[in-house]
Image (tube, helix red, strand yellow):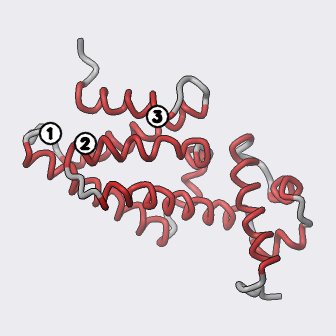
Amino acid sequence: MAINPKDPRANRSRQALLEAGIEVLLQNPNASLTEVAAFAGVGRATLYRHFKTRDQLIHELALESLALTDSAMEPIKAQNLKGREAIEAMLFAVMPLADRFHFLLSLWNIVEDDPAVTEIYERQLEELAVLVEQGKKAGSIKIEIKTIWIVTTIDCLIYAGWWIVRGGECDAQEAAESAVQTLFGGIGA
């Protein structure tokens, strides 16, 4: 039975399942669809009308994560921030997403080869590379360090921040500050 996208009840069920998926997978990345359905307060039949497999649910959550990352970047783009300034603002904008998408760190292998996920993620990395190049031209980022190295470092700092925030070792603000300091100041004394 196909789901009518204009059916408000079906949309509420789908949203409840997505929210439940985030909560349940944050607690247990190995959780089953049955556990997600129970947390959402919907039956298995409703669950399977929306998501046939656990991987399909994770795929939807990965797309939502990437969309929220794009949304977090919109104000930075609207301010026309460039280079280092934009990178710093981006780190402060995305660190708060740890509470929603930390679980993807351990489940990324499920979606990493998906064309839709790959397209968005690669576009985001390319946009970050443009910011790095802008910083190099402005003299705020060392030109001798390869852009791909810097982009990968920033990506890893985001993941490290998400991991530490979710573990309760610091909050998103402190994680962003540490990422900025690490990236632009290095760890040397």
Q: Sequence-wise, which precedes: disc 2 or disc 3?
A: 2
- Is any part of residue 187 visible from this angle? yes
Quick one: SS at disc 3? helix
| Residue 140 place in picture, x, y as percent | 13, 38
Q: Amino acid at mark 1?
A: Ile
Label 2 sits on residue: 150
Foreground tag (1 vs 3)? 1
Judged left or right of residue 187, residue 27 is right
Label 1 sits on residue: 141
Q: How far is the residue under mark 1 from the one under mark 3?
A: 21 Å
| Residue 5 place in picture, x, y as percent | 71, 84
Judged left or right of residue 64, residue 70 is left
Q: Amino acid at mark 3?
A: Ala
Badge 2 vs badge 1, beta-carbon distance below 8 Å: yes
| Residue 136 place in picture, x, y as percent | 11, 45
Residue furthest to the front in view is: 79
Label 3 sits on residue: 160
How crowded pointer 1 is (Cα within 10 Å; few <14, some 14-19, many 20+) is rated as some
Quick one: SS at disc 1? loop
